[in-house]
Image (cartoon, rainbow, N blue to C red):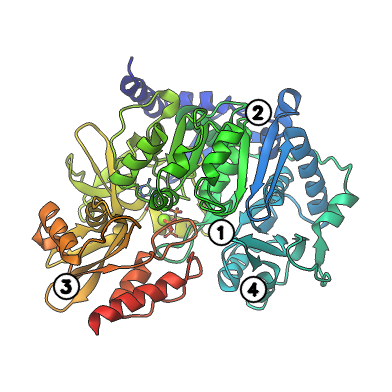
Amino acid sequence: MNARERYEEFYRNAMDNKEAFWREQAQLIDWETPVSQVLDYSNPPFAYWYPGATLNLCYNTLDRHLEQRGDQNALIWVSTEVNKTVAFTYRQLYEWVNQAAAVFRQMGVQKGDRILIYMPMIPQAVVAMLACVRIGAIHSVVFGGFAAHALASRIDDATPKLIVTADAGIRGGKIVPYKPLLDASFKQITIPKPNVLIVHRDLVPQSPLGVGEWDWDQEIALNARAHIPPVAVDSRHPSYILYTSGTTGTPKGVQRDTGGHAVAMRASMKHIYDLRPGEVMFTGSDIGWVVGHSYIVYAPLLTGATTILYEGLPIRPDPGIWWSLVEKFKVTIMFTSPTAIRLLKKNGPEWIQDHDLSSLRYLFLAGEPLDRETHRWISSTINGQVIDNYWQTETGWPILTNHAGLGLMATKFGSPAVPAYGFDCHLVDERTGKPVKDNEKGSLMIKPPLPPGCMTTVWGNDQRFLDTYFSRFETLMYATFDYAMRDEEGYYFIMGRDDDVINVAGHRLGTREIEEILCTHPQVSEAAAVGVTDAVKGQEIVAFVVVSRDGAPPEGKELKDLISREIGAIARPKEIYRVAGLPKTRSGKLLRRSIQAMAEGRDPGDLPTIDDVAVLDHIKKAIEATHD
Ligand code: ATP
Ligand code: MG
């Protein structure tokens, strides 16, 4: 059997023999009350995986590995911000997590209570997550880049009993306050102020503790010998809440179960990521995002692997830093975002190629479109397999991917390959809901039940779950809010988000297609296309490009001609601006709406998730300069 046939058989088995398939996957996890029934789907689209079975997530990540892997590294923390590397074995992490669990208990946290974690990329953040699920509490990690307002709305929604934070973080050598931002958020919340546990870092002088505030180190020291038995919870007990990135609107509190989540994570390591117990995984992301939850914390630890937690930028002290980690720690599987790779691309391949990358089997990229050029560039630069995978906070693991664990199918640049086992993907006409033909663009929908590991509801709001995701058509289908196309070989191509369409005189053009073409120009490293209102045509296209450092920068006309030639005159941008950077979320997602607002001369609005505010100014100036 070749890889394609193996995949097809595997996928079909997951569809046709759903119960048997997921019963078998469940054996990858240790249960307290064993699995009997696999799925209760009596209340569609709410899927209840492994009803009645009980387990503890922390037990599965730590305790069960102690006997065989007690002295193996579980977590290696590398901070290029404070120049530290600290490794923790499974036993050390286990001890620390027990101490933290005891502290949480002392602070009155019970099973089902929420703990909000607002922390930089330090090991205490992972310890807090695991300690939380150890006692059956529910964590909600809020990305450290969020400021007071975003934080307050999440505190109000998750109503935590305890908040774990640090007094400060550091990014690009600059100290970032955490506790002061939390204090500012307390002025805006509508619930009583929760208890606060603070990790003091030697970045700022230690502030005196206020009412209801405790010091992490002190409390941990008081519980140095504590052992807290893991609390077995029902499979559907929430393990965590995580808010979506908020690229397209108000963030939704994605609720994840425990049993389905554990099974999905462990199974994805085996069949998709091909990470084996004892190996090393490096995910260059943040624990505040779903990629960090799944592939820095849960999946590698459930597998008995070593995970690298990296605090710092991918290009500091130099653009070779990540690849030196691959060499030093013999990383076998690496995972990051296309944005990070584009950043490295701007700096040149030598930074990567200077390192011995022979341990690296695969590099996975996800989170936003991976354009063909970047895919091709990074594949040849690392001389290895680069796997584009498409998924969402909502699903927790890939919807579309090439399955390394089953043997790789041929790569098509620009495509995240094929549906992952368990995802029943359909492409339909956005108006009629009828299936589209091969090579035609459609809305990507998933027929429920969603497989294990996917969101089970919106936190505290079943109705919003139904209204947001399942109300698109008459038949019950989960909407991804992305467009895709499938070719005759079954490979999918993501064509952009539902709201990324530009309508020029009745022609609907995907922003992704235009950006792809712009990126084929050798000097263009990044591009964004948006629609601006036009009295005649409805919308006109305006594009922004970031030009790489070498070579003569292209003229606007040259790029416009390129679009006319490759897509058609209808797609020819009215204006192309050269800018220093594009506004993105900290997780690397293009903030297209804010670019569009500026292109239309409007205010980009409140952007709590933006990575670098300075780029907005630069864009504004570029626009103004053209219109003077
Ligand atoms: P919100 O839902 O709050 O607007 P968001 O959709 O950006 O935010 P995430 O769940 O972090 O939040 O991102 C998932 C989205 O990212 C997908 O729906 C898709 O648009 C995009 N995406 C993720 N991976 C890929 C990929 N490999 N190729 C193309 N797009 C991708
Ligand atoms: Mg989304």
- Residue 337 coordinates in the image, percent (x, y): 44, 48
Helix, strand, or loop for circle 3? strand
| Gap between marks 4 and 3 measured at Cα | 41 Å
Q: Is residue 527 left or right of residue 339?
A: left
Residue drawn where x is 47% and y is 59% of the image: 245
Q: Which mark is residue 420?
A: none
Earlier along the polypeptide chain: callout 1 or callout 4? 4
Three-letter code for the amino acid on which mark 1 is drawn:
Gly
Element under disc 2: loop
Which quarter of the rendering shows the C terminus? bottom left
Q: Depth check: 544 or 463 in front?
A: 544
Tag 3 residue: 538
The residue to which callout 2 is attached is 30
Secondary element at tag 1:
loop
Q: Position of residue 396 (x, y in %)?
A: 49, 44
Whether tag 3 and tag 1 are in contact, CB under 8 A, the answer is no
Mark 2 or mark 1: whose residue is earlier in sequence: 2
> In the picture provided, is 75 more to the left or to the right than 465?
right
Tell me which numbered mark, 4 or 3, is placed earlier along the sequence.
4
Residue 185's disc number: 4
190 vs 318: above or below = below
Give the spatial CA distance, label 2 vs label 3.
Answer: 58 Å
* Of marks 2 and 1, the one in the foreground: 2
Q: Amino acid at mark 4?
A: Ser
Mark 1 lies within 8 Å of ligand 1 (Cβ measured) = no
